[in-house]
């Protein structure tokens, strides 16, 4: 009898979590407060970096390189172990499903693109802000949106309350034009956007550590994951064809 592993987590997710743990461990256990501030200035996403009228505009370190890499590197930093822990749980849940469908390299590219989309949305709605934004939530929100495109399909991970075999993660994706016609998807969207709107109205943190939630970045990452899903989704593998002779058309 073949037994399914208790935790069937793709290696790219395990590696991603290991990197995030290592980064936060170094920041909290090895670096001084001044050194950690240096890390934030170089790698967190700070909207004031792009506004010459702000106090810090043009004065933040890193130059043009930081103007580019912080669109992604902010997602590798976290404000606390609680912040990391919450994101880790959601990354395991939704990132694993997407990684099993996309494969490692496509998933990493998807993670970076949705992080950048989250940063762009945050920049549009918080122009000139000097507060650094950190956390992987925008990319995780993108993974939630991507999983929504296939998880509810017949034969998918949630289609029949199963999802142990790899084939369930490779069912045909729900076309974007049909996303808003599935009641389960609509319910998911209502809950997800409702929670983020509440965060925005109340400036509350799910981690309970008095940190303001960058809910606009969540929405940016989510929309990117939903709209750009087909860019990363592998083409279905056609079944082998046995040809006994030439076929005329």
Image (cartoon, rainbow, N blue to C red):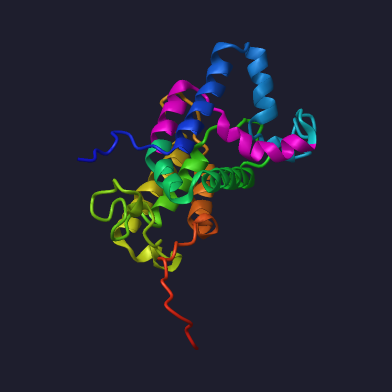
Q: Quadrant of residue 26?
A: top right
Residue at the outermost bottom position: 249
Q: Is residue 243 something that shows in the picture? A: yes
The residue sitting at the left extreme is: 1
Q: Residue at 53% x, 57% y: name it.
A: 228
Q: Is residue 73 left or right of residue 217?
A: right
Magenta stretch, residue numbers: 64-90
Spot occupied by residue 29 in the image (x, y as percentages of width and height): 54, 12
Say whether residue 156 is left or right of residue 246. left
Which residue is at 42% across, 39% downward? 10
Q: Is residue 162 above or below residue 84?
A: below
Q: Is residue 234 above or below residue 79?
A: below
> Dividing the image into 4 quarters, which one contains the N terminus?
top left
Q: Position of residue 236 (x, y in %)?
A: 45, 62
Q: Residue at x 76, y 36 (%)?
A: 65
Q: What residue occupies the far front of the structure in this picture?
A: 244
Q: Position of residue 103 (x, y in %)?
A: 49, 47
- What percent of the width, then of the height, locates residue 145? 44, 51
**Residue 206 visible:** no
Residue 127 is one of the magenta-drawn residues: no
- For image coordinates 52% across by 38% down, the residue present is 214
Principal secondary structure, stretch drawn in magenta: helix
Relative to 245, residue 162 above or below: above
């Amino acid at each position: 009898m073949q037994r399914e592993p208790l935790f069937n987590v793709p290696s790219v997710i395990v590696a991603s979590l290991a990197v995030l743990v290592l980064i936060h461990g170094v920041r909290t256990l090895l670096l001084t407060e001044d050194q950690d501030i240096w890390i934030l200035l170089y790698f967190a996403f700070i909207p004031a970096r792009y506004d010459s009228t702000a106090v810090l505009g043009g004065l933040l370190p890193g130059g043009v390189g930081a103007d580019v890499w912080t669109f992604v590197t902010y997602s590798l930093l976290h404000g606390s172990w609680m912040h990391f822990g919450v994101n880790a749980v959601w990354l395991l849940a939704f990132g694993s499903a997407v990684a099993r469908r996309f494969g490692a390299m496509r998933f990493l590219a998807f993670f970076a693109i949705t992080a950048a989309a989250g940063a762009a949305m945050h920049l549009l709605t918080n122009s000139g802000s000097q507060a650094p934004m950190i956390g992987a939530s925008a990319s995780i929100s993108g993974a939630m949106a991507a999983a929504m495109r296939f998880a509810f399909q017949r034969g998918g991970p949630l289609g029949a309350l199963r999802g142990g075999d790899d084939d369930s993660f490779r069912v045909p994706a729900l076309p974007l034009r049909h996303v808003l016609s599935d009641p389960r998807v609509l319910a998911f969207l209502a809950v997800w956007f409702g929670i983020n709107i509440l965060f925005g109205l109340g400036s509350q943190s799910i981690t309970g550590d008095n940190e303001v939630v960058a809910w606009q970045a969540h929405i940016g990452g989510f929309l990117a994951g939903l709209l750009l899903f087909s860019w990363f989704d592998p083409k279905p593998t056609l079944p082998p064809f046995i040809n006994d002779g030439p076929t005329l058309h």
